[in-house]
Image (cartoon, rainbow, N blue to C red):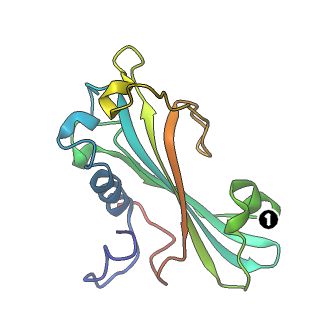
Amino acid sequence: MVQQLNNTKTNKQITSFDLARISFASCLNLFYNNSMFDPFPIGMYYDIDYYYVKRINSDSYNFQVCYGSTSIGHSPNEMSKTCELVTVKTLAEIQEYDPNLACEKDGDEKLLLECCYRKRKLGLFNINHLGFFLLNPKTTTTRAGPSNNFLVYHLIIVPKPGLFPGRNE
């Protein structure tokens, strides 16, 4: 979805609103209505963090974090979303996020997508809602920091030229 969303637009640069819609669409297999929003009837929500890097030289990278999350709001239009400012990081700092984010040539770009479900209200959360009756997935800390994540998935892609850095809309 990240690669195809802006194909018909004149301005190909991705926006925070685009990323929120991608996050919303990617969790519809579990949440088929607004149950992923406040008041979180099954006690969890969905989040995707997008980590963009572009190599400037062998030890210098442009770096941007964007996210789309159902943690706030009552509908897709009210979702929590943002694209932070682009910063410059060293190769070592980029490799702390993920060693596979290191690029081979100046100008190369990569995007790490970190998708996860997060427990919101511990009293309402019941692992049986996910179909786990014998297993209990472990919670973990993600790059974004919270420790209430489970079913965390990482994917690294090379974004189409011009999509990133993202902008707020």
Determine the image quadrant of residue 75: top left
- Residue 83 lies left or right of residue 77; in this view the side is right
Q: In front here: 122 or 134?
A: 134
Q: Residue furthest top?
A: 123
Q: Secondary structure at mark 1?
A: loop
- Residue 44 in percent (x, y) is at 37, 31
With 46 as the anchor, is 158 left or right in this view? right
The vertical placement of 82 against 138, above or below, is below
Q: Residue at x 25, y 41 (%)?
A: 31
Percent coordinates x, y for residue 105 in the rendering: 73, 86
As drawn, 71 above or below 112? above
Q: Residues within 10 Å of mark 1 (few under 14, many from 20)?
A: some
Q: Residue drawn 56% across and 31% down?
A: 138
Relative to 42, 139 lies left or right = right
Relative vertical location of residue 157 with respect to residue 20 in this rendering, above or below: below
> Residue 88: where, in percent of width, then height?
71, 65
The image shows residue 142, relative to residue 25, as above or below, that is above
Location of the C terminus (image quadrant): bottom left
Work out which quarter of the rendered image holds the N terminus and state it.
bottom left
Counting from the top left corner in percent of width and height, residue 37 is at: 27, 35
Residue 123 or residue 78, whichever sits in front:
123
Residue at 33% across, 33% down: 131
Of the residues shown, which amino acid type is indicated by label 1? Thr
Residue 77 or residue 4, whichever sits in front? 4
Residue with the mark numbered 1: 90
To which quarter of the image does residue 26 belong? bottom left
Toward the left, the furthest residue is 33
